[in-house]
Image (cartoon, rainbow, N blue to C red):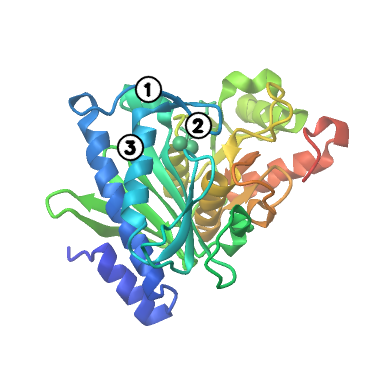
Amino acid sequence: MNRISLTQYLVEQQRERGRIPGQLRMLIEVVARACKRIAVSVNKGPLGDVIGTAHTENVQGEVQKKLDIISNEVLIQANEWGGHLAAMASEEMDSIHVVPNRYPQGEYLLLYDPLDGSSNIDVNVSIGTIFSVLRKVGHQRGIGEDDFLQPGRFQAAAGYCVYGPQSQLVLTVGDGVAVFTLDRELGSWMLTEQNLQIPADTKEFAVNMSNHRHWAPPVKRYIDECLAGSTGPRGKDFNMRWVGSMVADVHRILCRGGVFMYPWDAREPDKPGKLRLMYEANPMAFLVEQAGGAATNGRQRLMDLMPGKLHERVAVVLGSKNEVERITQYHQEAPAAEAGPAAR
Ligand code: AHG
Ligand code: MN
Ligand code: MN
């Protein structure tokens, strides 16, 4: 079969739909090349110096794995010289990284989780890189954290790379979702799927069940009904999957449907959820919506949330549209005191 490369896809998308201006095409190609480099490190495993912790902590208060830091460095070095972006923000960096004065600044802002699913690195389970692209507002050179605080609906592009049995890059620029598979012999990302569609209904949910006793009632209600299966109110049996890498769980849902939840729970009641809005929830929400799914925080569309802080966390419910709508409805039906933290 005559497949096309990522480069040809981007050039043709620009020619036919004018949605990938030069700097955005450059940004996507540079990030894709950086993900190839990360894939090489990931695939080395114990043969390279990439396993285990770096004995440092990030702004999230999490112990960093060596691969968290390696991946972050790869993305910074790949992106700072090209003149396609003005600044970057990363899960692994406290504040933004502005393109050094020795390089020209471009029109875009890049946000990323350089290595998602870090708890799976040492046990050889799929992990990934998640990225989100925003446009720089205004034209002055000075860039601050506030320039990044844009709702997810303003994203120019979003995607992830999943380092699994295949390395695959999944991308949207707002015209549907395309999948590229890494051809290791050519060293090229080759188009293998486009216009992914998530089925509106599903029989598969993804949640960390060990948190069940800490959930708010609407979440308990939804999951308990799924567990009741054909004998319960849903009248059908459900299956469960939980990889512990958002990238892997979301990729499965984009490919075959399902609903993913990381809801608020009472373990840390002041946190709305575990996942980060700007570089986990928003890029995944863009991809899921582009594939015909839905993505909320249990109440509101994720991509409508106005961020207050770069590293803020959010509850996440995403995937098959009809299931997400049901979960949102359960939150709306619950008395305010029972529905978890106040709506934003
Ligand atoms: P990260 O490794 O970037 O911190 O992200 C891990 C996230 C997400 O990938 C996954 O869905 C979730 O953490 C798993 O959380 P639990 O280990 O609490 O299930
Ligand atoms: Mn992550
Ligand atoms: Mn991470």
Mark 1 element type: strand
Using the rendered view, name the quadrant where residue 95 is placed: top right
Spot the residue most to the left.
Answer: 185
Amino acid type of the residue tagged 3 in the rendering: Ile
274 vs 291, nearest the viewer: 274
Calculate the distance from the C-alpha at mark 1 to the C-alpha at mark 2: 12 Å
Mark 2 element type: loop
Please say if 209 is above or below 219.
above
Determine if the C-beta at disc 3 is less than 8 A from ligand 3: no
The residue to which callout 1 is attached is 53
Instruction: Say whether disc 3 or disc 1 marks the residue closer to the N-terminus.
Output: 1
Amino acid type of the residue tagged 1 in the rendering: Thr
Mark 3 element type: helix
Determine if the C-beta at disc 1 is less than 8 A from ligand 1: no
Q: Quadrant of the N terminus?
A: bottom left
Q: Position of residue 311 (x, y in %)?
A: 59, 42
Amino acid type of the residue tagged 2 in the rendering: Asn
Side of 146 where 204 appears, left or right:
left
Q: Position of residue 9 (x, y in %)?
A: 30, 69
The residue to which callout 2 is attached is 58
Calculate the distance from the C-alpha at mark 3 to the C-alpha at mark 1: 11 Å
Q: Position of residue 177 (x, y in %)?
A: 43, 60
Please say if 21 is above or below 232.
below
